[in-house]
Image (cartoon, rainbow, N blue to C red):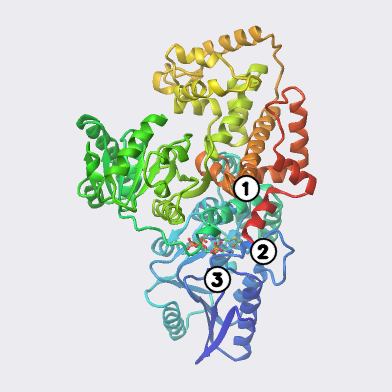
């Protein structure tokens, strides 16, 4: 018998204990072990079989690492059928998370008991596939079509109490999974409970499936797995079980072959790999219980909110009492939002806005804090002034962090006597909502300061990405580049509105010009002015948007920008003045506008993104391609199902992408210089993902 499933006969009950740490994924050895265990139990003349998981959980699903490799028999479907058709009474005892294939195994056993803290779910659509071992056929039979569709198309985790109410499980009992399970099996045997075979239950109710398909497809914003999974559920209603299983298999294989499946699985593993840095192995973070925040604008208040939600004490410094009051107002409003959404209790709210939060205008209030994040005006002299004050006020060993988006962290560090303690912590606005945290490591930053930053990010529920120092770090540096590609397309003939539409159709939540209006056009204006003195003469920078800014239009906050928001329509309508200014600028530059298809727009935009990302990786600003991918997923609304810009590039094929960049370079050789790393990968026939694998091996 396989080591992954331990067999033991306890009286007339055969106990199968899965032991495949860390999450008892249903890999080949476990599947073999389950079948062998059932066979052994039957041969031993047991009356019943109990299946449970050792360690932290019942089966958390199929082994995702096996996806994309040739399947090895027995497939999970066959394992489930073998379990369900056993003449013995088979029972699952669940704890932790019974997910995906795990819940499918549980549904093929005849009864299910769980501890109160257990969670169940079919999260396959989140990996770009569908429950492929009978989940779409058995769950509707157990709990009805509507409830099954909700679980299958959202992939949400359902707590034990709700699972009991729905009928996914039969009983909740606390105790060890073994004790719990044995007690339940004995109870069932005493009652003479019959085997209850899920696949033999009558089919569930029919719904208007075509209408539902359209609704689910639309909700997926380009992601297809939820809608396809719905079709499999439909088959469970309309076809006999065996044929429904065949249909489920076909649809499963279809999804398995998609790029979306590859993208989503890349996202799953990269999300976990991103904050695992080899150089931090064994490095102890410094303890952080209280933090300081300098500046209580939108960003500072968001950072303070995030820290309070993570259970930290916060001291926020503002310039004067009035500004401090305004900062308190922002934080309270953020926390009220969390209270309303049920994320915190009223008691927690009171503690967070009471004892845990102090406001001051005096840096000496920071004497005891363990870490400070500065979020003041984005200007080097202002930042340096703040850091000199922090150097004087903070205790030795306190981490001094800047939330700058672009500025040189090395230079900021020079205004202190302790550059080892200085680091960049680049939050994204609103900081209590956005998941991304760029941890910017300067030349002298000590390893335990980096470890402290990652530990803080984890506490705050962020996805932390290590970045090196350069203008814009990982995300904003790449953003500036592809935004420039979009700006060039406008000069050459596209409109901002066509670009926004092409990119939202591609899958972005918003197009770049709608985002610019939301963020405030003054930000880009200030940046263009800052970069003007060092700008290369060959760089193409449009002037029309400066004219919009000069007229006092900064986007949503002033009611006008690329779009006009005065009519009250959500998202605004195109601002007619913008097209007039663009037309005038084209005429001035002697440009004859050319047509761009939506596909051309996406291709150029993405090519610029990938090319700059390749430079960022090549220069070591991002250590691995997956660091760029996670930056874009969690900070820039990049569709998760593409896996990130560099996974997208791999799936498109790097040689074709490089060829396009070379073709674009014929007209604008300055902007479209191919990144050396991209050229190297193409020459060697390798992918960005090969570099990820190399980094983790
Ligand atoms: N297969 C392989 N490895 C898995 C895995 C799986 N199904 N689930 C988790 N792991 C790995 C993680 O990659 C991680 O590995 P490292 O330590 O090397 O990074 C380790 O197990 C621990 O996972 P987490 O860090 O995520 O631990 P957690 O406690 O935060 O979360 C969890 C545990 C809720 C189970 C979470 O890991 C999770 O959601 N896993 C995916 C569950 C899932 O999607 N199951 C469905 C699989 S598809 C399927 O079953 C198809 C089918 O129908 C046949």
Q: CA distance from mark 2 to mark 1?
A: 22 Å
Q: Is residue 435 visible?
A: yes
Pointer 3 local density, CA inside 10 Å: few below 14, some 14–19, many at least 20: many
Pointer 2 local density, CA inside 10 Å: few below 14, some 14–19, many at least 20: few
Q: Quadrant of residue 252?
A: bottom right
Q: Position of residue 27 (x, y in %)?
A: 63, 70
Up the image or down, 667 lies above or below 625; here it is: above
Q: Quadrant of the N terminus?
A: bottom right
Could you tell me which secondary element the residue under label 3 belongs to?
A: loop
Could you tell me which secondary element the residue under label 1 belongs to?
A: helix
Q: Position of residue 109 (x, y in %)?
A: 55, 73
Q: CA distance from mark 1 to mark 3?
A: 29 Å
Q: Residue pushed farthest front?
A: 417
Q: Residue at image x 42%, y 14%? A: 552
Give the mark toward the camera: 1 or 3: 1
Asked if the residues shown at circle 2 and circle 1 are in contact, with their CB atoms under 8 angstroms apart, the answer is: no
Q: Residue at image x 74%, y 46%? A: 681
Q: Which residue is mark 2?
A: 66
Q: Which residue is mark 1?
A: 625
Residue in the foreground of this view, choosing between 348 and 274: 274
Residue in the foreground of this view, choosing between 144 and 479: 479
Up the image or down, 590 lies above or below 284; here it is: above
Q: Quadrant of ligand 1?
A: bottom right
Could you tell me which secondary element the residue under label 2 belongs to?
A: helix
Callout 2: CB less than 8 Å from ligand 1: no
Up the image or down, 200 lies above or below 475; here it is: below
- Residue 673 is marked as none
Pointer 1 local density, CA inside 10 Å: few below 14, some 14–19, many at least 20: many
Query: From the viewer's perspective, is 695 left or right of 389?
Result: right
Q: Which residue is mark 3?
A: 24
Of labels 1 and 3, earlier in sequence is 3
């Amino acid at each position: 018998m396989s080591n992954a499933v331990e067999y033991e006969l306890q009286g007339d009950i055969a106990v199968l204990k899965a032991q495949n740490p860390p999450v008892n994924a249903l890999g080949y050895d476990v599947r073999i072990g389950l079948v062998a265990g059932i066979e052994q139990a039957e041969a031993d003349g047991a009356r019943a079989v109990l299946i449970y998981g050792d360690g932290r959980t019942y089966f958390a699903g199929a082994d995702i690492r096996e996806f994309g490799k040739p399947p090895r028999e027995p497939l999970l479907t066959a394992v489930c059928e073998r379990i369900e058709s056993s003449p013995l009474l088979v029972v699952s005892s669940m704890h932790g998370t019974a997910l995906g294939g795990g819940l499918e195994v549980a549904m093929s056993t005849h009864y299910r008991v769980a501890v109160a803290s257990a969670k169940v779910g079919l999260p396959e659509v989140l990996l770009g596939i569908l429950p492929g071992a009978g989940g779409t056929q058995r769950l509707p039979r157990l709990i009805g079509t509507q409830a099954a569709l909700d679980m299958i198309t959202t992939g949400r985790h359902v707590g034990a109490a709700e699972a009991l109410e729905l009928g996914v499980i039969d009983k909740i009992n606390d105790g060890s999974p073994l004790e719990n399970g044995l007690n339940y099996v004995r109870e069932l045997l005493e009652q003479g409970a019959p085997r209850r075979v899920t696949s033999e239950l009558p089919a569930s109710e029919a719904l208007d499936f075509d209408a539902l398909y359209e609704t689910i497809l639309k909700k997926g914003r380009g992601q297809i797995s939820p809608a396809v999974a719905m079709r499999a559920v439909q088959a469970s209603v309309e076809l006999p079980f065996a044929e429904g299983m065949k249909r489920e298999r076909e649809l499963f294989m279809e999804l398995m072959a998609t790029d979306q499946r590859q993208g989503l699985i890349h996202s799953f593993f990269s999300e976990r790999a991103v904050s695992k840095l080899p150089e931090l192995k064994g490095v102890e973070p410094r303890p952080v219980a209280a933090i300081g925040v300098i500046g209580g604008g939108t960003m500072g208040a968001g950072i303070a909110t995030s820290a309070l939600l993570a259970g930290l004490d916060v001291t926020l410094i503002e310039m004067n009492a009035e500004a401090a009051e305004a900062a308190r107002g922002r934080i309270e409003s953020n926390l009220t939002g969390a209270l309303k959404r049920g994320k915190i209790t009223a008691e927690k709210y009171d503690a967070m806005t009471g004892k845990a939060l102090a406001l001051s205008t005096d840096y000496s209030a920071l004497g005891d804090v363990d870490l400070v994040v500065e979020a003041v005006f984005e200007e080097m002299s202002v930042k340096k002034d703040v850091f000199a004050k922090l150097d004087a006020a903070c205790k030795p060993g306190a981490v001094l962090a800047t939330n700058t988006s672009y500025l040189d962290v090395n230079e900021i560090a020079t205004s202190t006597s302790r550059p080892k303690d200085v680091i960049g912590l680049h939050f994204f606005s609103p900081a209590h909502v956005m998941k991304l945290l760029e941890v910017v490591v300067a030349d002298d930053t000590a390893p335990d300061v980096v470890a402290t930053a990652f530990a803080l990010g984890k506490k705050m529920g962020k996805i932390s990405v290590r970045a090196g120092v350069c203008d814009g770090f990982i995300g904003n540096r790449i953003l500036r580049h592809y935004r420039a590609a979009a700006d060039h397309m406008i000069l050459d003939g596209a409109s901002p509105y066509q670009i926004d539409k092409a990119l939202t159709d591609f899958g972005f939540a918003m197009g770049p010009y709608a985002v610019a209006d939301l963020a405030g056009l003054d930000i880009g204006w200030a940046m263009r002015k800052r970069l003007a003195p060092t700008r290369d003469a060959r760089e193409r920078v449009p002037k029309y948007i400066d004219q919009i800014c000069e007229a006092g239009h900064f986007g949503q906050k002033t009611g006008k920008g690329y779009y006009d928001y005065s009519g009250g329509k959500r998202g605004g309508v195109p601002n007619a003045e913008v097209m007039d200014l663009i037309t005038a600028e084209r005429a001035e530059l002697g440009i004859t506008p050319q047509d761009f298809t939506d596909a051309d727009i996406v291709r150029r935009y993405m090519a610029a993104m990938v090319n700059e990302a390749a430079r960022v990786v090549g220069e070591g600003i991002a250590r691995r391609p997956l660091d760029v991918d996670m930056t874009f997923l969690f900070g820039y609304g990049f569709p998760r199902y593409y896996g990130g810009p560099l996974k997208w590039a791999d799936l498109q094929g790097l040689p074709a992408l490089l060829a396009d960049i070379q073709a674009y370079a014929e007209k604008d050789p300055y902007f479209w210089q191919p990144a050396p790393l991209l050229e190297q990968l193409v020459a060697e026939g390798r992918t960005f993902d090969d570099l990820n694998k190399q980094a983790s091996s």
